[in-house]
Amino acid sequence: MSERDRKEFLWMLFLIGLATLALTVMANATTLARLQFDELVTTANAIARVHCLRAETHWKSGEIWTRTDFLVVATNKGSLPRIVEVEMPGGIVGHLHSRVEEVPSFAPGEEAYLFLWISPDGTFRILGWSQGSFRIRKESSTGQETVTQDSASAPMFDPASRQFRHGGVRKLPVAVFEVKVKRAMATH
């Protein structure tokens, strides 16, 4: 085998290895199936309007996690303590960054409606990650509060159509959102 053939062979092996690595990474990726609003309401252990107090990262079983403390402003479903701790994967510890797509993060002062479930280890998590987080914004000109689902900007897999689609709640007045939650709870 000539030197040129050997280099081409090694280059081809490198490309095959790179393609195999890319396929492995893609195979391990998480795809969230879109949950309908009624599914979020019925599946959640608790639904609450919350105010973020603080977020702290820590190591848990060799991974970076973020624990966020929220003041419960109002509870729409379930029973929650006055301060609820929500734990989600990802965060920053020192110079290490861990980012999990579609896992919401919060800054102190932010308000949201959260659809929560209790994990097997007893900690609260956000149901459907970004799908169970609805940020509250106050329009400065009108003072009207609206909610927007964190997942509204991200494409989610729709099992019915077997396609990725955009959807979710966008700029819905808080009063309308609360009625929508009550109706979903009443019908299920």
Image (spheres, helix red, strand yellow):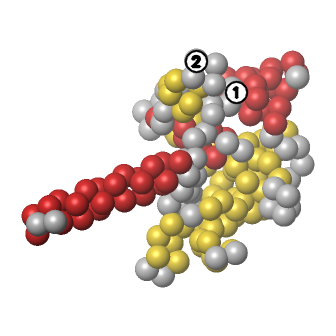
Q: Nearer the viewer, residue 68 or 88?
A: 88
- Give the quarter of the figure containing the C terminus: top right
Q: Quadrant of residue 63?
A: bottom right
Where 112 sits versus 166, above or below? below
- Identified by mark 2, the residue type is Ser
State the residue position of label 1. Answer: 37
141 lies above or below 80: above
Callout 1 crowding tier (Cα within 10 Å): few <14, some 14–19, many ≥20: some
Note whether 49 is above or below 107 in the view shown: above
Residue lying farthest to the bottom in this orientation: 94
Disc marking residue 59: none
**Residue 86 in sight from this viewpoint:** yes
The percent position of residue 183, horizontal first and vertical second, equals 80, 20
Image-quadrant location for residue 125: bottom right
Whole-Å distance between the Cαs marked 2 and 1?
A: 17 Å
**Numbered mark located on residue 161 in the image:** 2
Looking at the image, residue 49 sits to the left or right of residue 57; the answer is right
Q: Give the secondary structure at mark 2.
A: loop
Task: Where is residue 34? Give x, y as percent.
Answer: 62, 31
Neighbourhood count class around disc 2 (C-alpha, 10 Å): few under 14, some 14–19, many 20 upward: few
Residue 82 visible from this viewpoint? no
Nearer-the-camera pick, 61 or 78: 61
In this rendering, is residue 26 above or below 93? above
Q: Secondary structure at mark 1?
A: helix
Q: Residue at x 58, y 18 (%)?
A: 161
Q: Earlier in the sequence, mark 2 or mark 1?
A: 1
